[in-house]
Image (tube, rainbow, N blue to C red):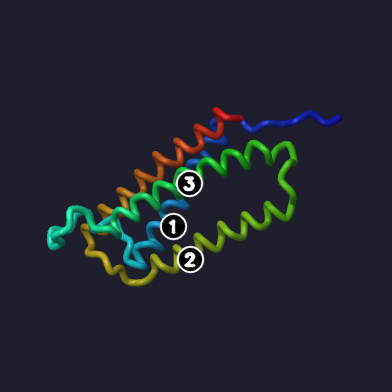
């Protein structure tokens, strides 16, 4: 019987964080294209307490970052032992490539957000995605 090989926990944590951050940034870019931008938090021309689009974008980026880190860490733990079918792996790779390609296409278009606000929103999305991806990966590794 073949022995089960495990990835080092730091490798799984690092890969899950990178995956979660990339997915969170992709969702941020796609959301900004459709009017869900974090830049609404720094606008002074609105009379609302917090624009609804900014709140939805905040929660969407946090959710995608957390779930991306969690599912990547879970999949990496089970992939080594061969528990993931080949078709499922191919499907997940295709979904990731299509999401990142869509984000790249959205990023190449002119931005509807002002420059300073866009930079702050991008940095906020990066930090939020990194923290939530770390939390998701950490919880997945503690569970396993």
Residue toward you, 41 or 8: 41
Marking on residue 26: 1
Tell me the crowding category of disc 2: few under 14, some 14 to 19, or many 20 or more residues within 10 angstroms, Cα based: some
| Residue 8 percent coordinates (x, y) | 60, 30
Secondary structure, mark 2, is helix
Pointers 1 and 2 in contact (C-beta within 8 Å):
yes
Please determine whether, in this image, residue 120 is positioned above or below residue 6: below
Residue visible at 52% across and 35% down?
13
Work out how far the residue at label 1 is from the one at label 2, CA to CA, in angstroms. Answer: 8 Å
Quote the CA–CA distance across marks 1 and 3. Answer: 10 Å
Q: Is residue 138 above or below residue 116?
A: above
x, y (%) of residue 100? 50, 60
Tag of residue 20: 3
Residue at x-position 43% and y-position 47%: 63
Of the residues under marks 1 and 2, which one precedes in the sequence?
1
Mark identifier at residue 81: none
**At numbered mark 1, what does the secondary structure look like: helix, strand or loop?**
helix
Q: State the residue at coordinates (56%, 43%).
A: 71
Left or right of 115? Residue 15 is right
Residue drawn at point x = 67 percent, y = 31 percent: 6
Report the quarter where the N terminus lies: top right
- Give how far across and how far down residue 22 sits, in percent: 46, 51
Q: Quadrant of residue 30?
A: bottom left
Q: Which residue is mark 2?
A: 102
- Tell me which corner region of the image, top left, top right, bottom left or bottom right, holds residue 11: top right
Name of the residue lying farthest toward the bottom:
109
Crowdedness near tag 3: few (<14), some (14–19) or many (≥20) residues, C-alpha within 10 Å: many
79 left or right of 24 in image: right
3D distance between C-alphas at marks 3 and 2: 16 Å
Determine the secondary structure under disc 3. Answer: helix
């Amino acid at each position: 019987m073949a022995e089960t090989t495990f990835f080092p926990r730091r490798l799984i944590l690092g890969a899950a964080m990178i995956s979660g951050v990339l997915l969170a940034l992709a969702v941020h870019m796609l959301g900004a294209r459709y009017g869900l931008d974090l830049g609404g938090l720094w606008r002074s021309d609105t009379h609302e307490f917090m624009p609804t689009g900014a709140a939805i974008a905040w929660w969407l980026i946090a959710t995608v970052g957390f779930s991306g880190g969690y599912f990547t860490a879970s999949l990496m733990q089970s992939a080594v032992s061969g528990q993931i079918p080949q078709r499922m792996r191919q499907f997940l790779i295709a979904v990731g490539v299509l999401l990142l390609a869509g984000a790249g296409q959205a990023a190449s278009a002119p931005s509807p957000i002002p420059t300073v606000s866009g930079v702050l929103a991008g940095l906020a999305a990066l930090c939020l995605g990194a923290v939530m991806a770390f939390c998701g990966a950490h919880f997945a590794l503690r569970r396993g």
